[in-house]
Structure formats: structure tokens, C-alpha cells
Amino acid sequence: MMPLCKAIAKQLLGARYEGAVRALAAAGVLYLAVRAAGWQVTVAPAVLCLSTAWYTAGVLLQQLQGRRLQDTVAALLAMPCRQRLAPVYTLTVGGCTLLTRTLPVWALFAAVGRWQPGQAAAALACGVMACTAAAAVWLLRRRQPWVALLGAAGLAVPLAGHTGVVLGLALAVTAASLAALRTADAYVLLAAAPHRLPARRGRGRGSVLVYLARYLAANKNYLVNTAGLCLLAFVLPRLFGAGAGLFPVGLGILCLNTPLCTLLSGDPDLEQALRTLPGQAARFGRGYCLFLFGVNTLVAGLYLAGWLLAGGQPGAAALVPVFALQSAILSVGLEWLRPLRGWKTESELWHHPRKYLVPLVMLLLGAGVSAWPPLSALLAAALAVQCAALLWLTGRQKN
């Protein structure tokens, strides 16, 4: 069993487990930075346990559905120990999730508050429980529908109240999930891969927008992230109020749509085809930019609607297309010029620090517009120049 765990861990963390070293270093830097800033917040233990359980379960489900891990599973199925592959694989992925994704969350909570050993043990137990329960629900949801009760119990355990009760219930749910995972079939891991829609032949040269829409429909994680941004678009007006000064800042925050902005990095075969076939890069780039512009406009439009309902000024609507198109151009340009390489899982790709570059630029532009409103006219003029230059460049490549 240990050789199998090591083989899976090296696929996720690197040949020398360098991913674990980076995760520990990032958690340490985050802890020291927040601690040095002197931020202290009183956080209830239930919030720590609830954040741990829900966040860990969500990240693990994303990783189990990732396309990159399907190749690893297919290779491991050829090994003689495939009867134990499902529990060992899911538990190893869960352990890597706790180390690389949940550990920074724990570091943040540890930096802003003071926690007793019993509370820390309850949070750790909730993290392990989330991994085992989420894996059991995902792998056995069709053969044994009763495992949905384990998932519901895992989500409700952090709300039990007393720390000792939470710890005991978390251990009980973990034991039940481990017992259920022993009957899981490893081939379900392959069946969890995103379903590819059949190709259809039609007249003309095809549509990039239709391809992107079908790609989005075949990757449900992308839709979940976009739905989360739509929900955030409704929440931000209530946090900011109806003052006109913070509206551009909200537009910059809503540019953080990581999965859609890393389309080429997540599909190296598509990127290679675009760079090889003549004229396809320009054609796909225009369609990709329009697609991101449409998604950004949808999210920003919901944000504008919530802003108007909160009593905001209608004149702020002029900023929506400017920020939506500028964000799309920057995202497509960054993805084409500096695609991400060497990632192990889709979760690692989506949480790469590069994802903050475009939102940071848009946030700075939003802060600039808030401080000096005439800057919006300059941004619109610069955007028009960018669009004209890109249309000219892509037209030359097409010809």
C-alpha cells in the first residue's frame, strides 16, 4: 500500500515532493505576514470547523473530477493492487488537499485568533472527515445512494456546538466513510471524467463561441465558479453601499474568473493546435475574447442591478462594458503570451498566483477611477486603441 501511496503523492506533489515544501512555505509566510500586521479577530470554533469541512470537500470534489488525474488513474489500474486503488487513491488525494489547500486556511485562522488544542484537533478531524465523506459520496453515489447521508452528516457536524461533540461526531463519520470506501470500485474514478460531447459536422467553418459554450457545458466546475461570481455580484452592493466611489472597485473584484481565464493552460493540446495551424490563433483569440467579454458583462450586469436596487446612480452603467472588455483582453493576452506549465491538477492550475494579476490591475484601475472619475474616459480611449490594434494584428495573421 505504501508504494501505491508514494506513486500517487509524487504525481500530485512532484518527484521530490516539492509541492509540499511550497505549501508549507506559503502557509508560513501567510501566518507571519498576518501576524506581523497585528490583525486579531474573534472567530467562533464552529466557523473554523465549518470553513475547514466545506472548503476541503469542495476542493477534493474538484480534484476528483479533474481530467489530468484521469491519466494517472488509467495507469494505476494496470497495477495488480487495483482492488485497493479507490480508497488509497482518494485518501492520498485528500491528504494532499489538506496539505496544499486547507493548510493556508488554517494558517490564516491561526494568525488572526487564539485556538485551544481541542479546537485545533476538532478542525483537523473535520478536514479528514470532509475528505473521506466527500470521496465516499462521489464514488458510491450510484451504487449505494445511502452515502448521501454521510455527506449531509459531514456538512452538519461542524454545527454540533461543543468542541468535544464535534470531534467525536467527526471521527464517527470518518470511520463510516472509510468502511464505505472499502467497497468502492476504482473504475468509477475514470467514469468521473468530464463527458465530452460528440462532434457535429455542419456547414461553414464552425464557430469558436459555440465551441467554448460546449466546452463550458462539458466542464461543470467552470459553471460553478461563474455561478459563485454571480452570487458575489449580488452580495457586493450590500457590502459597499450605494456610494458611487466603490462601484469600480467591485467591477475589478468580479474579474476573478480563474477557470475561464486559463482555458489554454488547462488544454495543452488545444494550445498546440492553435499555435501550429495557420490563422487559427487570431480567429480563436477574437472568439475567446468575445466569450470572456460576454461572461464578464453578465456578472457585471448582475452587480449593476444589485447596485441600482441599493440606490446607486444609473450613470455607473457606462463603466460595465469598459471593465468587462479590458479584463477580457488582458486575460486572453496573458494566457497566450504566458500560459501556465508544469501543473499537476486542475485545482493547482486554478489557484496559481498568476490568477491575481489581471484582477489586481483591474482593481487598481477601479481604485483610480474612484479617486479620479475623469480617468474612466482615458480608460475608454485606451481600450478603443487596444481593440483597433488587436483587430489589425489578428487581421494580418488571418491573411
Image (cartoon, rainbow, N blue to C red):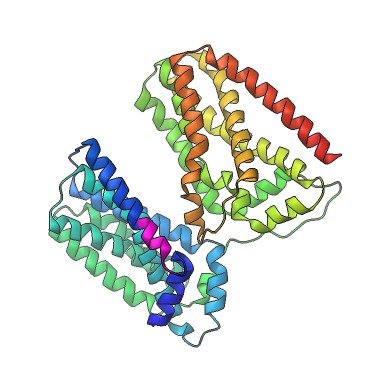
- Residue lying at 53% horizontally and 80% vertically, measured from the top left: 77
Rendered position, 237 above or below 150: above
Q: Answer yes or no: is residue 154 visible.
A: yes
- Counting labels gives 0
Question: What is the chief secondary structure element of the magenta stretch?
Answer: helix
196 up-or-down from 257: above or below: below
Q: In the picture, residue 97 is in which quadrant?
A: bottom left
State the quadrant of the C terminus. Answer: top right
Which residue is found at the position 57% from the left and 62% from the top? 67
Q: Which residues are magenta?
A: 16-23
Please tell me which residue lies in front, 336 or 140.
336
Q: Would you say residue 191 is visible in this rendering?
A: no
Q: In the picture provided, is 270 more to the left or to the right than 17?
A: right
- Percent across and percent down for residue 382 are 63, 21
Name the one closer to the observer, 347 or 234.
Answer: 347
**Image location of residue 248, percent across then percent down:** 47, 23
